[in-house]
Amino acid sequence: MSIQVQDAVADKAESHRPQPLGRLADGSPLARLRVVVIVPCYNEADNIAHVLRNLGRHCPWADVAVIDDGSRDGTSAAARAAARDPAAPDGRRVFVLRHCANLGIGGAVQTGYRFAAERGYDVAVQFDGDGQHRAAAVRPLVEALLARGVDQVSGSRFINPRGYGQYGIRLAGIKLLALLVSLVTRRRVTDPSSGFRAAGRRAIELFARHYPQDWPETEALLLLRRAGGSFAEMPVAMRSRRRGRTSISFRKGLLMMAKVSLAILIAIFQSPPSADAGKE
Amino acid sequence: MLFGQQVCLIAMAAVMLLVTLELIRRRWLREEYAILWLVTSLFLLATGVFPALLLWAAEELNLAVPTLLTLLCFLFLTGIVLQYSVVLTRQAHRQRRIIQEQALLREKLEEIAGTPADTPEGRSASGQADDGSVRR
């Protein structure tokens, strides 16, 4: 009996496997890919509709997985309402996944990667729910992932810096991290804390099993490198947040520097990520 | 040992024992931890009542200075704290897995059972608990 039920569930789930959207008639290799945009958000009810609208306009070929990390302002309700927007292109799905408690950014992003791994997406794009990333840059990012044949491409604000006002001290912090990461990975990294990234199948599966917790972007690079993966950067412009305050204050910035630097040192000694799921 | 010290030690041990017993009574401690803290507080109480125990232990362990026993206690406590850190880390990993798994499963369930997008505005199945707490 229970086996039958399970089968029914599996069959039904099978029918929701993502399909290559093939809506790009211009012969782009993207047409063959199943792409999901992971949008982690926490208390972004004011921004999420705007973010989803922009994604719908600029990436009608990609599904979206909104990960509501236990928000208390009805973010997932806002996301669901926006997902029902009649102006949204059909055939494209917006999934809303809600954590019943707040896990932090790392946990939210990893839920997205687990979703992508389970549903068999070819490419997963990380895209912040606060509106600082540009939907128009998603396609170039995915194209760069394909063209360069790496496991992950991240958008860097500092290759051709424009359109993002960084505080001097914050910029210095990021530069210091970039230097550290470049030394450890022996790859040139200019913006290790960028949360705007595209990951291929191998990186998706790795991150579904292992993903760091706080300020995870930098550590994720190290993790990928240690697992034998490759990454690259491409220049992007970012906006400052649309509404509300950034989650990183100056004091938190210092904490972040300390934590991430320590994580980098620890990562050097840690055993490489195993294929053993469920441990982390 | 001075009398004042002895009273102090006995009082501390008694408070610790009472707190442990109360925690056990409220079921706030799992058995293995309950036993650990019961034994620890009983040991403290015993050394308070019979200070000679400490001297005897120091002699048996070939410690020239009996206060070196505090060092041993410190090591013991450090070990416990370290073990708890490991346990906490493991629990955090598990909790993360469970919350993620729950979110993924609920999404799948909603797909199969019909989407909650059909429910009235602002009352999406997943939003209820926390939307409620906002209005509180």
Image (cartoon, coloured by chain):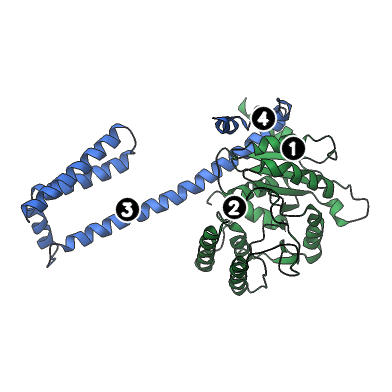
Chain colours: A green, B blue
Instruction: Name the subunit of mark 4.
Output: B
Q: Residue at x 80, y 61 (%)?
A: A146
Query: Camera-side residue: A52 or A206?
Result: A52
Decide: few, some or many residues near mark 1? Use Cα within 10 Å; few <14, some 14-19, many ≥20. Answer: few
- Residue B124's tag is 4
Callout 3 secondary element: helix
Of tags 4 and 1, which is closer to the observer? 4
Could you tell me which secondary element the residue under label 4 belongs to?
Answer: loop
> Residue A18's x, y, as percent?
78, 43
Spatial distance from mark 3 to mark 2, Cα to Cα? 35 Å
Instruction: Look at 20% across and 59% down and name the residue there.
Output: B70
Q: Which mark is residue A247?
A: 2
Calculate the distance from the C-alpha at mark 4 to the C-alpha at mark 3. 45 Å
Residue with the mark numbered 1: A14
Looking at the rendering, which quadrant does residue B27 occupy?
A: top left
Q: Residue at x 54, y 30 (%)?
A: B136
In the rendered image of this protein, does residue A42 appear above or below residue A30?
above
Label for residue A23? none
Indicate the quadrant where residue B67 lies. Answer: bottom left
Query: How far from the left and from the top, in percent, is residue A19?
Result: 81, 44
Left or right of residue A213: residue B56: left
- Foreground label between 4 and 3: 4
Q: Which residue is mark 3?
A: B80
Q: Quadrant of the N terminus of chain B?
A: bottom left
Give the side of residue A11 with respect to residue B6, left or right.
Answer: right
